[in-house]
Each structure stands twice: as C-alpha cells, then as structure tokens.
Image (tube, rainbow, N blue to C red):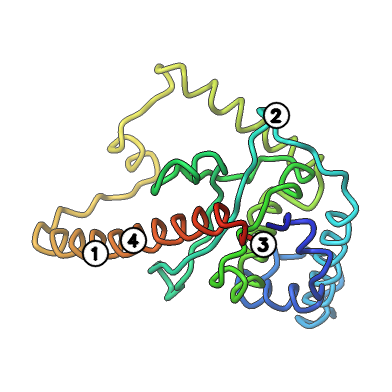
C-alpha cells in the first residue's frame, strides 16, 4: 500500500483542485475589492489549495503515537445528496482481525501524521482515487490549511469537552429550542416509521459494502497483493 503522501506526489494538482471544487467548493473568501469576479475568487481558492497540497508533499511523516498503522479506503454507499461513496479510516490491525473494524475521523490529526496513513490498493479505491484523495484533503483542511489553525481548533475542542463535563451547563432539547425561538414540530408517527425503514435499508447496504471492502483489503494483504 502507498501512503497518502506518496499518492499526492504522483497526482495532478490541478485535477485534484478541480475535483475538490466539484465536490466541496472552496471556503468563501472575504475581499474588499468588489470588482473581483467569481472566477477571480475561484482562481485564488484554487491557488491556495494547490499550495496546501505542495506543503503536504514536503512534510516529514510523523508516526502514530501508539505505533499503529492507519488505512484509508472507500466503498460504495448511499448518502444524502445522491453521493454514492464513503471514505473510511481504520487501524490496520483492526482490519486484519474484524470484518467491521471501528472507523475514525482525523479532522484534528496533525497533517504530518495523516501523510503517513496508507491508502488501500483495492480495485475500487484505485478507480476512485481522485475522489478519495479529495475526501482526505477535505477532512484534513476542515480547520484550515495550516497546522497552527488545526492546533488552535483542537484546543477549542478540548476546552469544549471539559466544559461538557460540568453537568450544570447542560440544558434539555426543549430548552435549546426555546432559547432560539424555535417551535418543535409535533411527531408524525407514520412518516417517521417510513423514514426509519429507509434509514435502516440504507444503513444495511452501507454496512454490507463496508464489510466486503474490509474483507478484500485483508485478503489482498495476506496474499501480498495490497499495493
């Protein structure tokens, strides 16, 4: 398997940026010059994104603190908005032992550590590598394009977690709605029951595809064909 950084180094930066625009758009850019066109802003966003990719390519990989290896892969899925793929990150040792390994977010993981994550070499992953890399870059950059921004957001998260431990700060859902002046809609049992059936069917499909891809990754690695 190749690492995220190895994949980035061999990919076309412009193609990745275009795929990113198609999937996620860029964050709004505040400008004082009102004469700037939408294309100007898109070009600037693309330049910043490509600079981010180039920065990632040059990082020295930082190993996992626990010494575990991480694997990212994609598989078929049914999601809101018509999206037909999900991307997951699991620990390699968990993949080798379980059909349903726990998957994790890495929004707050250091850039240098994510660069050392492996990307599975299954046929599905190779076919959709552009989309998968864009998913990785999106999650990595959710807090910004610099490690300093990520560190600042991580501190905010840690502070929020500590704050939640104080139960005196907790409020009920009814109090939350009232504080925003939102009136809760009465339950619609028939519609809710149908919605649950849709959710359960989608979840069953997604879990089937996830487990099937995990088994394939494990088989390929055992056979030594997991490039």
Could you give the CA–CA distance between mark 3 and mark 1, rounded to whole angstroms? 33 Å
Tell me which numbered mark, 3 or 1, is placed earlier along the sequence. 1
Q: In x, y percent, where is residue 218?
A: 50, 53
Q: Is residue 14 above or below residue 215?
A: below
Q: Which mark is residue 65?
A: 2
* 59 relative to 207 in the view: left or right: right
* 136 relative to 112 in the view: left or right: left
Tell me which numbered mark, 1 or 4, is placed earlier along the sequence. 1
* 33 relative to 134 in the view: left or right: right
Q: Secondary structure at mark 1?
A: helix
Could you give the CA–CA distance between mark 2 and mark 4, rounded to whole angstroms? 31 Å
Q: Are marks 2 and 1 in contact (CB under 8 Å)?
A: no
Tell me which numbered mark, 4 or 3, is placed earlier along the sequence. 4
Tell me which numbered mark, 2 or 3, is placed earlier along the sequence. 2
Q: Circle 3 is placed at which residue position?
A: 227
Give the image quarter of residue 207.
bottom left
Q: Residues within 10 Å of mark 4 (few under 14, many from 20)?
A: some
Tell me which numbered mark, 2 or 1, is placed earlier along the sequence. 2
Q: Which mark is residue 208?
A: 4
Taking the spot 36% from the left edge, 62% from the top edge, the residue there is 206
Q: In x, y percent, where is residue 36?
A: 84, 79
């Amino acid at each position: 398997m190749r690492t995220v950084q190895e994949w980035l180094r061999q990919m076309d930066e412009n193609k990745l940026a275009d795929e990113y625009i198609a999937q996620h758009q860029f964050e709004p850019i505040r400008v004082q010059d009102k004469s700037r066109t939408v294309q100007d802003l898109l070009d600037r966003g693309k330049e910043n994104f490509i600079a981010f990719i180039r920065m990632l390519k040059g990082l020295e990989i930082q190993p996992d603190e626990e010494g575990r290896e991480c694997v990212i892969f994609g598989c078929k899925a049914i999601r809101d908005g018509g999206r037909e793929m999900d991307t997951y990150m699991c620990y390699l040792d968990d993949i080798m032992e379980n059909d349903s390994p726990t998957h994790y977010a890495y929004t707050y993981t250091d850039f240098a550590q994510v660069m050392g994550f492996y990307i599975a070499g299954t046929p599905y992953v190779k076919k959709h590598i552009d989309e998968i890399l864009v998913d990785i870059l999106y999650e990595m950059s959710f807090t910004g394009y610099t490690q300093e921004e990520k560190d600042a957001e991580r501190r905010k998260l840690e502070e929020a977690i500590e704050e939640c431990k104080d139960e005196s700060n907790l409020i009920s859902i009814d109090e939350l709605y009232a504080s925003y002046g939102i009136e809760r809609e009465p339950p619609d049992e028939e519609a809710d029951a149908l919605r649950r059936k849709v959710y359960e069917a989608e979840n069953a499909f997604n879990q089937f595809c996830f487990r099937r891809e995990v088994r394939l990754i494990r088989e390929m690695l055992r056979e030594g064909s997991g490039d």
